Image (spheres, rainbow, N blue to C red):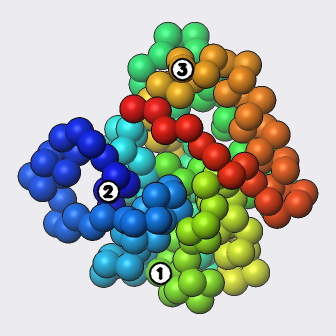
Amino acid sequence: SDGHSKDNTVKIAKKLADKIVFEKINTIAGGRQRGAEVAEGKILAYSDADAVPNKDWLEKLLKPFEDENVIATYGSITLYDASKGAELLARQVMKRVLSIGARFKVHNAIASNLAIRKTAFDKIHGYNTSLATAEDLDIVRRLKPLGKIVFVKDCLMPVSARRIKKWGVPYFLLFHALNGLKYQFTGKAGEEYEIIR
C-alpha cells in the first residue's frame, strides 16, 4: 500500500508484492485501510516500509490466533540502524512498557508489528482514516470488546531509527508519550506527523 512515495518504492515493490495499491487520503491509517480492502486472507498482518522483519516474525505473531477468541496480536520493536546501546535501550524500554500495559489490558499496540483477524477488522470497519497519528491505539481500542488481544513478548520487529535521529531522543520520547496519553485519556491524537524519508 503506497502512501505517495516519490522514490523507487513502487518499482521495488512490483518485484516482491502480489498486489500494489495506492492510498489517496495521505494518512498512515489510510494506507493501512487501503491494503486491507484488497487483502484476501483471514488475518491482516501489518508492518511499515522501514521495517525489516525477522524470518520467524509471522510465525510468532500469528501463533496466538490458534485460539479462536484471539482477534489481534502485537509485538514490540527494536532498532536496526542505531548504536548497540540505543538499540538495547529501545528494546528493553518498549518491551517493558508494552508488557505493563497489556497486564492491565491497556494495549499500546504498534502498527509496525500488528495482526488483526479480518472478521473483527470488518466489524469495526477498520481504521479511522482521518487520524494522522495513534491509528494503531485507536483500532485496538475499538477491537477490544470483540475478543482477546495478545501482546507477543518475543515477537520483535526491527525498524529504522531515522525519526529518532531527525527529532532527537528527548523530543521523540516526549511526542510519543504525550500523544499516547492524550489518546488514551481523551480519544484524540496529534493531527500532524512529519514525513521523514
Q: Would residue 110 be found to the left or right of residue 159 on screen?
A: right
Q: Quadrant location of the C terminus?
A: top left
Q: Quadrant of residue 49?
A: top left
Answer whether labels 3 and 1 touch (C-beta < 8 Å): no
Lower position in the chain sequence, tag 2 or tag 1: 2
| Residue type beneath disc 3 | Lys
CA–CA distance in space, label 3 to label 1: 35 Å
Say above or below: 162 vs 168.
Answer: below
Q: Are marks 2 and 3 in contact (CB under 8 Å)?
A: no
Residue labelled with disc 1: 118
**Above or below, 22 relative to 134:** below
Residue type at mark 1? Lys
Residue under label 3, please give it. Answer: 166
**Which residue is found at the position 69% from the left and 59% from the top?**
137
Residue 11's spot in the image, x, y percent?
13, 48
> At x 48% / y 16%, what residue is drawn?
82
- Between disc 2 and disc 1, the foreground one is 2
Separation of marks 2 and 3 at Cα, in angstroms = 23 Å
- Identify residue for label 2: 2
Residue visible at 49% across and 49% down in the picture: 112
Q: Is mark 1 on a helix, strand or loop?
A: helix
